[in-house]
């Protein structure tokens, strides 16, 4: 059996700039992967975020070119994705998802609406306490009860912003504070101690660079503030290490792991280790977020998802049924199709054998 493997590049402007501690994004640079044959089509998404995992857009392009050649020679997709994952995790994920969803067929994997809405974290952004209050009130009006704040400023500045947002929370609401690797040890410790009394803050996400495991261990031994690791967590062994350094939660994303089955295995490992799980990607388009929302429900996850990248994109190249309603992700399915994806720049094309 022969299948047609293709990928296209799209540059997708955002509704407004998205600030991270290591970059401010004005567009998503996305590759869409398609696998077609035997009356079925599967799709995957690759949206690299340099500074997050190391894989650049240029490297993803090269990795796709190499994958194209390997697949044409008959290399099994699962084996190839596992081989790519250590250096090119975004590419590995998109490639694996294309083959996994092809096995399901697009009617089930993409067109079918989800049977339930998924609670969604709302991004609460502001540079002053007054701006933070206004944004928090807007989110509350839209039905959100979980706010995500991007951190990275001086601890005293960050404390004022967090406390301003916390005062606006509805009963039972919570805040997630995401540092995106911005802190050194002393500033992280000071921030945690400043906020230890604020029970509304559920966690501080990734205060240090991914390799700074010893600093994480020092921090968790010096403060009761709950820490979540994101950029440090790519494989099962790192989940165990998160427990060893005292983290209470891990952040998982489809783009970090080679496909849907691999992501499910990471969720099960985190549960086995007794860790809290936050799932979903804010730097991804509707295709990837749709697959994450499906997984969220199938895996029985209960925390608010962060699969909200789709809402940042001005316009998707395919019809999207993803919407936000009363603080929840409502997914009526995707109309993703070859003609729409082909409006982008063709990166690879090959006829490949289907090797199970």
Image (spheres, rainbow, N blue to C red):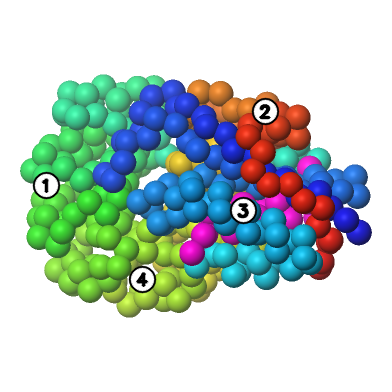
Q: CA distance from mark 1 to mark 2?
A: 46 Å
SS at mark 1 in the image: helix
Pointer 4 local density, CA inside 10 Å: few below 14, some 14–19, many at least 20: many
Image position, residue 285 (x, y; %): 55, 37
CB within 8 Å, label 4 to label 2: no
Instruction: Identify the residue under disc 3.
Output: 64
What is the magenta segment's predominant secondary structure?
helix
Determine which residue is flagged by label 2. Answer: 343
Q: Residue at x 74, y 47 (%)?
A: 349
Residue marked by disc 1: 155
- SS at badge 2: loop
Residue that mark 4 sits on: 242
Seen in the image, is 141 located left or right of residue 115? left
Q: Closer to the camera: disc 4 or disc 2?
A: 2
Sequence-wise, which precedes: disc 4 or disc 2?
4
Asked whether, in this view, residue 1 is left or right of residue 316, the answer is right
Give SS at disc 3.
helix
Taking the spot 45% from the left edge, 50% from the top edge, the residue there is: 56
């Amino acid at each position: 059996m022969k299948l047609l493997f293709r990928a296209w590049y799209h540059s997708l402007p955002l509704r407004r700039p998205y600030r991270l501690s290591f970059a401010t994004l004005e567009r998503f640079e996305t590759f869409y992967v398609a696998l077609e044959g035997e009356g079925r089509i599967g799709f995957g998404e690759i949206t690299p975020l340099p500074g997050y995992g190391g894989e650049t857009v240029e490297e993803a392009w090269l990795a796709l070119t190499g994958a194209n050649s390997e697949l044409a020679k008959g290399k099994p997709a699962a084996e190839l994705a596992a081989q790519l994952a250590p250096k090119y995790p975004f590419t590995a994920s998109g490639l694996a998802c294309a083959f996994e969803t092809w096995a399901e067929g697009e009617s089930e994997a993409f067109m079918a609406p989800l049977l339930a809405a998924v609670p969604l974290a709302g991004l609460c952004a502001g540079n002053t306490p007054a701006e933070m209050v206004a944004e928090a009130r807007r989110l509350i009006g839209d039905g959100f009860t979980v706010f995500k704040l991007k951190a990275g400023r001086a601890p005293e500045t960050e404390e004022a912003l967090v406390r301003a947002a916390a005062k606006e929370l509805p009963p039972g609401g919570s805040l997630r504070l995401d540092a995106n690797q911005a802190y050194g040890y002393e500033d992280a410790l000071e921030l945690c101690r400043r906020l230890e009394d604020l029970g509304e803050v559920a966690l501080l996400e990734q205060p240090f660079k991914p390799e700074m495991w010893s600093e994480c261990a020092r921090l968790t031994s010096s403060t009761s503030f709950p820490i979540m690791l994101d950029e440090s967590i790519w494989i099962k062994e790192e989940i165990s290490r998160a427990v060893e350094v005292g983290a209470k939660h891990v952040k998982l994303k489809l783009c970090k792991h080679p496909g849907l089955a691999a992501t499910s295995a990471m969720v099960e490992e985190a549960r086995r280790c007794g860790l809290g799980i936050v799932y979903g990607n804010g730097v991804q388009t509707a295709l990837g977020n749709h697959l994450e929302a499906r997984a969220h429900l199938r895996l029985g996850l209960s925390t608010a998802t962060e699969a909200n990248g789709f809402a940042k994109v001005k316009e998707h190249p395919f019809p999207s049924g993803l919407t936000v309603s009363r603080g929840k992700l409502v997914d009526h399915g995707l109309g993703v199709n070859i003609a729409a994806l082909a409006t982008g720049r063709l990166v690879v094309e090959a006829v490949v054998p289907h090797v199970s």
